[in-house]
Amino acid sequence: MIGRSAFGLGSWNTWDRMDFGDAVRLLRTAVDAGVTLFDVAHYDMGPHAEGSHTDVLFGKAVREAGIAREDYVLCGKLWLWDYPRTGFARQLETSLGRVGTDHADLVVVGDYLERPDIPRVVTDVAEQIATGRIGGWGVNNWRADDLDAALAFAERESLPAPEFAQLKYSIARRSMAEGEPYGRHFASGRLVLQASDVFEGGVLLGNREPRRKIGADVGGIRESIADTADELAVIAAEFGATRAQLALAFCLAYEPVANVLFGASRAEQLTDNLRALDLAGKHGKEIRAAVDHLRRDLDVNPDGTW
């Protein structure tokens, strides 16, 4: 199921920044073009205690667009910030209710500062899978040794194991996605990669001062990433592409990648970005070679020990 759509649309600071009619058109355009994966979370816990309504707006827009529930894949999130005090059953009741559905096809479990009780996490996820509320799960930026423990426990107890890892991955940030701790699970086929934060919140595309909240600057390299934007534009032009198209094609050309998440606020922007599929198919290897020197996280630990 995770590989059903090469692209996925994210929800963080997306639907709540758009005119409702534009959101409806964007969703309809996406599904008609085969973009059927939507990463939708309830952002109101831990550092994401934002009181956001982006998930509510998504649910309303997808219904207004006339998109049947079976025609898209909903990837939700289960947060570990307040876990287990706020358990997964309660989180799902809230998040699914806000979207207006009774199940998520997938969930991403993640974001923590202190190591959670890994066997309990795996067991609690399995319970929610058994109820039919979720279909499968992945991890988001876990420490590699915690992931190893989860995989081992799931195998030993015959419980559903994580199927994918949602990691920061871009032309500039490659440490975890290409490093050995996660890479060995990709190579063995135990996990696939869901690439996120592929534009560095727009910084990689030349927006030095994003007006919306964006992901953490792991390793303190964001300014260095911003400095690559002009050169990336030159390289993209050599392939007859935009910076966004090149950034997406770079990710698509990495074999472990099952899907690439990005945000779009206009249907035209989405349609333009879809050209990256053809670009990756024709020039993936050349693109990756051409931008290899733009990596900026060589000193960031690949095992997630930030």
Image (spheres, grey):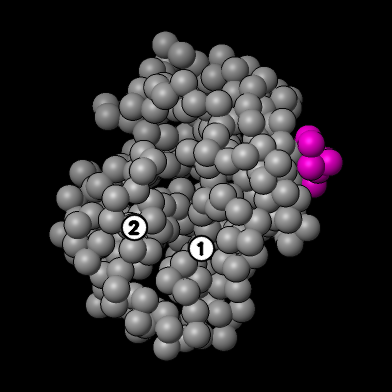
Residue 292, position in %: x, y?
A: 30, 77
Contact (Cβ within 8 Å) of mark 1 with mark 2? no
First in sequence, mark 1 or 2: give its number.
Answer: 2
Report the residue at 56% width, 72% height from top: 276
Answer left or right for 209 relative to 80.
Answer: left
Q: Is residue 98 magenta?
A: no
Query: Disc 1 residue type?
Result: Val
The answer to whether residue 80 shows anywhere in this view is no
Mark 1 crowd level (few <14, some 14–19, many ≥20, 10 Å Cα): many
> Which disc, if any, is residue 42?
none
Q: Position of residue 117 (x, y in %)?
A: 37, 24
Disc 1 on helix, strand or loop?
strand
Tell me if residue 75 comes above or below residue 9 in the rendering.
Answer: above
Between circles 1 and 2, the one closer to the viewer is: 2
Q: Name the residue tied to disc 1.
A: 257
Q: Is residue 278 left or right of residue 257?
A: right
- Left-right relation of 251 to 207: right
The residue sitting at the top extreme is 85
The amino acid type found where label 2 is placed reads Asn
Dividing the picture into quadrants, the one containing residue 44 is top left
Above or below — where is 116 with respect to 294?
above
Where is residue 121 drawn, in percent x and y? 46, 26
- Where 125 falls versus 246 (above or below)? above
For image coordinates 46% across by 67% down, the residue present is: 244
Determine which quarter of the picture holds residue 211.
top left
Residue 207 shows which numbered tag? 2
